Amino acid sequence: MIPKISQAVLILFALAIDTQTQCFINPPECGRRIEDIKAERLNKIVGGQQADPEDWGWQVALFIDTTYICVLGPILFLLFILDINEYLPFGVELLKYADDILAYIVGNTFGNLPQEIVDAVQRSTLCKVIFISPLRVLGSSVPTVYLLGQMLETVKSYKYLGFELSDSLDLDLQWRRVRSIVSPVEFLLNQLKLNDWSTPMLICVYRAYCLSHFTYSAVMLTSTSAAAKCEMNAFNSHLWRIMGIDDQTAGSYKLLPIAEFIDHVCEQTLNRILADPNHPITSCQPRNLRLNARFPFQTRKANKAAYHNSFLQKFLRKLRNDSNSQNARASLYLV
């Protein structure tokens, strides 16, 4: 019996539809089409079955908001996950995801299925007048796959939205990426301060252009090395000094030291996850069956330091310890 191998084909669309060419569909028709697609199919399709609307609720507004501008990238993915079924090899059951500018096709493969998937995507894009660049399409594993006669690159990991998709993950990479993005905020705050911007206005800029990146990266930044955390703290303290804030005055502006801020975001994130019984993380957690248990989940024993300090284990332990307090129990699932 031939063993199944899980593989993924990641397709990054290089060119969105140009509405000036009128080669596909005009924006008003996109609006009507997107409503039809929302009613018929959802963002995640598994074996032809519809997924839970909660899986993609926040993306609905994004798709609708971008309907009436020239770059219609999000529209491509609704059409892609709907229409690609016509072109896939017979009997193929795959998970298809569309998010931002990247489309995923993941499934169990036999033989040369990755090449068949790519060929199907190529046929689909030719019929739908959607253009993709072979240079921007990455195959996840062997065998070699070709697109338009060009061999696709095989990579061990793929970065998307700042996250390195890899089994062996260097969490400090996330801090280095965030640092490269937020470093210009120092110059920006200095210039705004020279133009007599008030401290509350500077804080708004700091929240928008700096803390936002720490927010979406918090689940990884919480597990970085001690050296990386020292760098984060030094960088954040420097920005505070530019804005005229110190440890004593930060509380009046509802600001936390960066390490506490990251942990606060992680705790709130885990609270939201555990509040959803259908979330994959929640459903996989073993239940605490003791009658007098104050925390509903068991915390697994970590054999390695990396797992012990990971987002999930770290904050499951914190919630378990906090549940000893009645107030903590009352707010455990407060979102």
Image: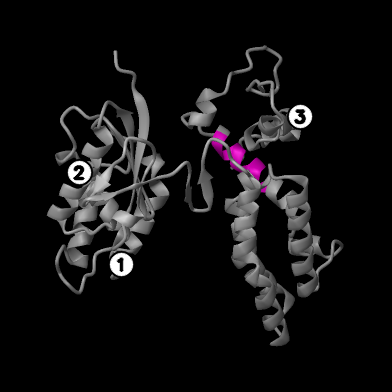
User: Which dot, 3 or 2, sits closer to the camera?
Assistant: 2
Residue type pointed to by label 1: Val
Label ID, residue 119: 2
Q: Name which residue lies at 56% across and 39% down.
A: 272
Q: Position of residue 17 (x, y in %)?
A: 24, 64
| Of the image marks 2 and 1, the number of the one nearer the N terminus | 1
How far across and how far down the image is residue 71, in percent?
30, 67
**Residue 52 in view here:** no
Amino acid type assigned to the residue bearing label 3 in the image: Asn
Q: Amino acid at mark 2?
A: Asp
Q: Which mark is residue 71?
A: 1
* Residue 55 appears left or right of 50: right
Q: Residue 48 colored magenta? A: no
Pointers 2 and 1 in contact (C-beta within 8 Å) = no
Residue 171: image quadrant is: top right
Q: Counting residues from the N terminus, which is met first, the one under dot 3 or under dot 2?
A: 2
Name the main secondary structure of what is drawn in magenta: helix
Please give the name of the residue rendered at 30% of the width and 28% of the height, measured from the top-left corner. Answer: 109
Which residues, given as a range, are shown in magenta?
Answer: 264-273
Give me the C-alpha separation between circle 1 and circle 3: 49 Å
